[in-house]
Amino acid sequence: MHPVEFDLIFKDTRSYYYIWRPRPPPGYRALGFIVTTLAMRGPIKPKLSDVMCVREDLTQSCELGDDLCANLSELKIFNTKAFKTGMFSKGVPVGTFVSTFSDSYLPHVGCCLRNLNPNLEAMPNLKQVDALIQHYGPILYFHPNEVYFPSSVSWFFKKGAKLFKKGKSSNGIPIDPHGSNLPRGGTNDGSFWLDLPSKGVDDVKHGDLESAELYVHVKPAFAGTFTDIDMWFFCPFGKHVGNWEHFTLRISNFNGELYSVYFSGDSGGKWVDATRLEFFKGNKPIVYSAKGGHATFPNAGTCIKGLSKLGIGLKMQADVNIQFIDASNKYHIVAAEYLGGVVEEPDWLQYMRVWGPTISFDWRPELKKSITHLPFLTRLMVKKLIHLFPYNKERRTGPKERRSWFGDEQQ
């Protein structure tokens, strides 16, 4: 139904624009605010027919997203996003916004749509998933100086990787090529871990690019209006033993177009709009894997993870190389829960513990060496911030133990 009235929220006499909040009829909710510009006679209120309000049972509450006008001190404009995201969420964002004038006062936040149809009829079937991957499958480049390449999981097992159990003094047990003798389910309780073989360690560390493939998890996003294609790759070694990294394609189920791609580098990862991606021969986005650590990036170059403005931290380098994986033809769909058992998940995917032994590291000594060239006052300030790089322990689980498996990628 149309709103019954509009409330004037803000007027700007310099730029001549006005922000209005629709007032919905009982049992309905407005999805956001609306803007009009100045006319000769003064501000013109929007027509009631300009906006539709939605039945309350077909909506879900939102939270404030990004500040869209951070440069305007007197006005705050935020986009909206659903409280809950992930493959089980029902919220469907509609790209609306809300306004406020103070950080201490937040308006009645708008809402998004809610999909009440549990069948997710817009999600692709398995044949369509294959078509999407073959059409949009990225080119995954590895750095020219990379020495630790990915491999298939089965190659890693066949080369002698072993399973260890806490409290046992044995040298570990060999792992079946399919991982059928790995402990299944549960959580990462520290009871088990994998490690490199006792012989041929260097050979295994360098991986096997020829056997490597992308392990694909297909899941609904935004209540089935989008499809997320998570593409995971495994490296026997990188920053640690058993390094899993990934990127995600988000495809619109309205038109089948690539909407955005998630990259795991840059401050815990970020989504990049399709219009800002690099492409290889048409529709294949380019993904860069950082040297050594294998985090993924949308562009070549050097990223400093740490105090990047001061140039202090871990350098993550990515570049084009003749060594790459074409994800459009080297992939294996390992999970698609919404298809109801059509995809058989491999045994190793059910292993929820870590894929390598615990590695302790401390970046602080290296950071202290790096700041010696800084001006005195800056050096004092940086020393106080070095606690941001505490002594840490690296333990990495497999894909299914990560929060993003059932949830959304970190924003």
Image: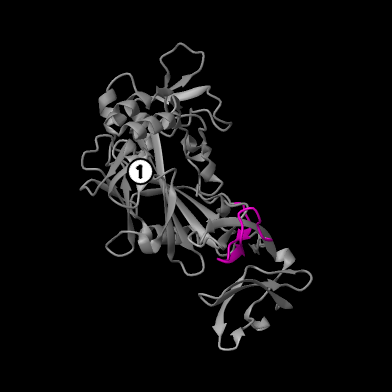
> Which quarter of the figure has residue 129?
bottom left
Q: Which residues are magenta?
A: 88-108
Q: Residue 76: where, in percent of width, then height?
A: 56, 61
**Magenta span contains residue 399:** no
> Which quarter of the figure has residue 154?
top left
**Magenta span contains residue 98:** yes
Seen in the picture, residue 289 relative to 64 is either above or below; the reply is: above
Q: Residue at x 20, y 48 (%)?
A: 322
**Main SS of the magenta segment?**
loop
Q: Which residue is mark 1?
A: 309
Q: Quadrant of the N terminus?
A: bottom right
231 or 378, which is in the foreground?
378
Q: Amino acid at mark 1?
A: Lys
In this image, 46 relative to 248: left or right? right
In this image, 4 relative to 39: left or right? right
Q: Residue furthest front?
A: 377
